[in-house]
Image (cartoon, rainbow, N blue to C red):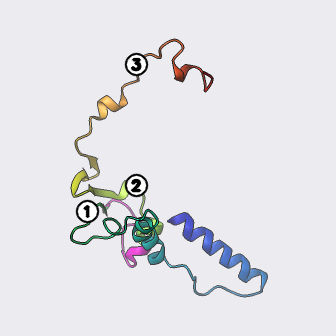
Amino acid sequence: MRTTLGADRSREHLEAHAEGRTVTHCALRADQVVDWATRGGARALGRDHDLGSLEVGKKADIVLIKNDRSPVSFPLLNPYGHVAVQAQRGDVHTVLVDGRVVRHEHQLIGVDLAAARRPPPAARPNGPWTTCGRR
């Protein structure tokens, strides 16, 4: 979302500069970008009947952002702008996927991180991953 806003605003300023104008109001707003990332993504997948917004009967996938230690978390003047421009992965407090909590208080729930960090078993001789794409 941050990249979309940045790229569009750069284009707007470049065009205005070429014409000797000053940009005082950007056409693309943060709320539009957040809508594209949620409802728009569901529409693009043809799944807006069960995804993309919090409504009865739809899958409840939601990301809750809260980080009281972050200097960009306050004051919160524009929630859409905060989500699109300021928030980062460390600000994700809670995540629900299909109504099930998978992250809470910045920690993954029900994931064996020790197992995920273990190195994979030794590669077999002539295994597909040892040939760098050649079979």
- Which residues fall within the magenta stretch? 67-81
Report the residue at 25% width, 72% height from top. 55
Where is residue 81 drawn, in percent x and y? 44, 74
Tag shown at residue 23: none
Of all residues, the one furthest to the top in this rendering is 125
Q: Earlier in the sequence, mark 1 or mark 2?
A: 1
Q: Taking 71 as reference, is 124 above or below it?
A: above
Report the residue at 22% width, 41% height from top. 110
Tag shown at residue 121: 3
Q: Is residue 94 magenta?
A: no
13 left or right of 65 in image: right
Asked if the residue under mark 3 is in contact with the one under mark 1, i.e. CB atoms within 8 Å, the reply is no
Where is residue 1 drawn, in percent x and y? 50, 65
Which one is nearer the viewer's eye here, 32 or 21?
32
Q: Earlier in the sequence, mark 1 or mark 3?
A: 1
107 left or right of 117 in image: left
Q: Is residue 75 magenta?
A: yes
Amino acid at circle 1: Ala
Of circles 1 and 2, the one toward us is: 1
Tag shown at residue 89: 2
Which one is nearer the viewer's eye here, 125 or 34?
125
Q: Quadrant of the C terminus?
A: top right
Report the residue at 55% width, 79% height from top. 28
What's the CA distance linking mark 1 and mark 3? 37 Å
Q: In the rendered image, which residue does mark 1 sit on? A: 60
Amino acid at circle 3: Pro
Q: Taking 84 as reference, is 15 above or below it?
A: below
